[in-house]
Structures are given as structure tokens and as C-alpha cells.
Image (tube, helix red, strand yellow):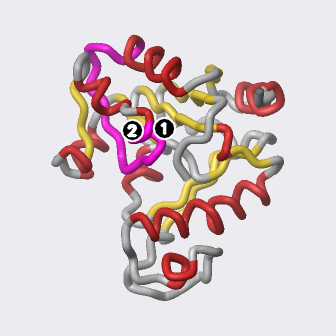
Amino acid sequence: MTDFTKVKANLERQGFDVTCFATAAEAAQYLTGKLAGKTVGHGGSVTLQEMGLSEKLSACATVYSHWNGHSFAEAAAAPVYLTSVNGLAETGEIVNIDGTGNRVASTIFGHEEVYFIVGRNKLSPDYDAALWRARNIASPKNAQRLKKATPCAAKGDKCYDCSSPERICRALTVLWEKPTGVGRAEVVLIDEDLGY
């Protein structure tokens, strides 16, 4: 069992609410209960996909996602936004890398509620390790999934800081504390490997 004590304390100190779950199924049940009747947006997230969260929420909430045929703007306009992370430091920093910018922008400003849904595999001991993970593990896997013509997708081993027109690493956010531009931000920690 993963010990989330340190990261939970550090995130709470930095203004985030934190909940912990043993399984993705328990976290999905919690989120569907909490978000029932609300309007929810989300960007691309393998974590959410693996949880079946968008489908579960669609039964009790209004859900906007480009994966469901909506625009990035529709998802970004929802009062509630769901995302995962590319790296989470036990010291409390949240790291995300994005190509379009919709996910990273939505974690910073404009939503009444933001939920970061994080599997244990995203956890790193400190900021440097979380950033390394985001660049060298999450980004190559996402580039491969999206079938991008980039060196990281071809080799699958690390970031090459390429100049490919299909590069997906175009924007980076590091949240040191809960941004004042969002109403409430909750990190949902799950003791399972989820996403990249």
C-alpha cells in the first residue's frame, strides 16, 4: 500500500484539498456522487479513460470533452474541470505538460472546481524527479499513443527536446500552490497505477 501521508500533508499546506482511495473504482464512485447534477469538462486523460469516469459521470452530470465530440472551448467553459497530472512530487508540486494548452490552462484559471486525479505511478520524491517523469515517461508515451512523428514517440525512451511540428510538449505548468484563479482544487490520490 502506498503511503500518501507526506504528499497529502504538503498539498494541504499549499491550499489543495486531498482525498485518498485504495482503488480507481472507489475514487470513481466518490467523484460521481460529488459531481452529480453538475457541468463537468475534461481534456484528454488516459487516467480518466481507464477509470471509465467520463461515461460514469455522463449518467448523472453534463460532461464536455473533445473525446466525446465537444470542443476544447466547451470543456474549458465548464464550471468543474477534471484532469490528471504528468508528475506529482511528494513535496507537493504538480507538473503537467501539454501540446494544445487546454489542460494546463484549465488547471490555473476560471473554474469553480478543479480535480486532479492521480494514480500512484505519477508520484515522485521531489520536484526535479516529477519534472523528469513528466518529460521522459509521460510525454513519450502520450506521443506514441497519439502516433506523433517525434523522436520520443519513435524511440519511446526519453524527451529529445525536439523541434518536430508534431511535438506535444509545448506548455509546462508547475503548481506550487493552489492558484487563486480557481475556486476549489482537490487532488484525488489513488493507490493504483493509472495513465502515463
Q: State the image coordinates of residue 177 (x, y, percent, origin top left).
A: 67, 39
What residue is shown at x 50% (from left), y 70% (from top)? 169
Name which residue type carries label 2.
Gly
Name which residue type carries label 1.
Gly
Q: In the figure, is residue 154 to the left or right of 166?
A: right
Give the image quarter of residue 28: top left
Give the image quarter of residue 178: top right
* First-in-chain label (1 vs 2): 2
What residue is shown at x 37% (from left), y 33% (from top)? 52
Name of the residue lying farthest toward the bottom: 163
What whole-number distance in Å separates the C-alpha atoms at marks 1 and 2?
6 Å
Q: Which residue is mark 2?
A: 110
The reply to whether the C-beta atoms of the residues labelled 1 and 2 are less than 8 Å apart is yes
Q: Is residue 193 above or below residue 170?
A: above
What residue is shown at x 53% (from left), y 84% (from top)? 151
Residue 68 numbered mark, or none: none
Q: In the figure, is residue 130 to the left or right of 103?
A: right
Q: Which residue is mark 1?
A: 181
**The magenta stretch spans residue 94:** no
Q: State the image coordinates of residue 22 (x, y, percent, origin top left).
A: 64, 21
